Image (spheres, rainbow, N blue to C red):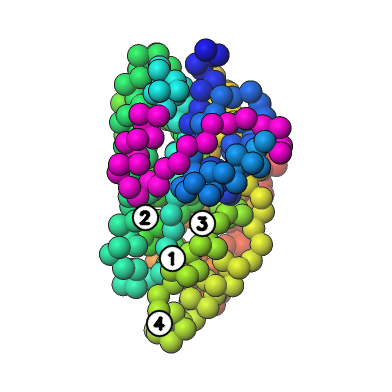
Amino acid sequence: MGNPSRNVLVTGATSGIGLSVTKELAATGFDLIATARTADKAEALGTLLAQLGLKARVLICDFEKADQLARLVDQVFEIWPSGPWALINNAGFGAPGAVEDVSTELAQRQLITNVLAPAQLIRAFVPSMRAQGTGRIVNISSIQGRISSPFMGWYSASKYALEALSDALRGEVREFGIEVILVEPSGFASSIWSNALPLLPENAHTGPYRKAYSGAEKLIGSKFPEPTPVAKIVRTALETTSPKARYLVGKGTRAIPFLRVLPERMLDQVMLINLGLMKAPLVLGIILSRTKRLRKSFRKR
């Protein structure tokens, strides 16, 4: 039967963070179930893991389809009658764009995949974790769940919601030996953003936001680092006795706590400056410079 405390379900495991997490955990002795959205992706993942000498059961689940999600839960309990010890909610969907440009359909898809589907898995597996007297729920969020930036409003809304649910859940299940952990990465290599390019609005090159969309295309097309650090953080969150409630990971994340205390108008300016849509006013430039020096002084302590 193996050790139930090593049973881990990883969603969205075929690329980016999910794939990196799957490889990291499989290489360190966890018993894994990994999900893929389609049969082709499931086969490709199984082949890749076999080539690497790693093992994981791969199940098919499109998280936008309620029947497939319910079937996944049934399959997990068929494999592990006592349920998973850990749930890694990683599967995600992103559609960038101005709030007025993102269609209702795309907004709903983000909320279903990034919030409602993870919540359904949580509802399904918390009772079995409670029966075991132990468990870990790791929700892969984003720095966009802490700081919302222009043209990422709907994606940020989904991640803010995931963080709010995680904060509530953490207090609800702690007495049962279940830990709830948020992992908040910055930019890492992932197909979520390359897949997002075709979802930009039809008027992306001619409409009122064309300058921003042009910049977004360049950003999405740029090279991001491999998500290995995120995978190692997830492993830490599973292996440590007392995991943190939140793990920020990646370039620029040290600035998040400082940005959150800026006045809203100033934070708006910082976001626009980072997007190349505004030049930094002299006063703001001085403040940002001092903030950088302050962060460096804290790191030296």
In this orientation, which residue lies closer to the viewer: 218 or 147? 218
Q: Measure how far apart labels 1 and 4 are at the Cα level.
A: 13 Å
Is disc 2 placed on a helix, strand or loop? Answer: helix
At a point 38% along the width and 62% down the height, the residue shown is: 153
Q: Is residue 67 magenta?
A: yes
Name which of mark 1 and mark 3 comes first in the sequence: 1
Q: Measure how far apart labels 4 and 2 are at the Cα level.
A: 21 Å
In this orientation, which residue lies closer to the viewer: 231 or 44? 44
Q: Measure how far apart labels 1 and 3 are at the Cα level.
A: 11 Å
At a point 34% along the width and 68% down the height, the residue shown is: 102
Q: Write down the quadrant of residue 43 in the picture.
A: top right
Is disc 4 placed on a helix, strand or loop? Answer: loop
Give how far across and how far down residue 152 sits, in percent. 42, 63
Name which of mark 1 and mark 4 comes first in the sequence: 1
Is disc 3 placed on a helix, strand or loop? Answer: helix
Give the labeled residue for mark 2: 110
In this orientation, which residue lies closer to the viewer: 292 or 102? 102
Amino acid on which the number 3 mark rests in the picture: Ile
Give how far across and how far down residue 44 sits, in percent. 60, 46
At a point 44% along the width and 72% down the height, the residue shown is: 200
Q: In this view, does 104 lie above or below 63?
A: below
Which numbered disc, 1 or 3, marks the residue closer to the eye?
Answer: 3
Q: Measure how far apart labels 3 and 4 are at the Cα level.
A: 21 Å
Name which of mark 2 and mark 1 comes first in the sequence: 1
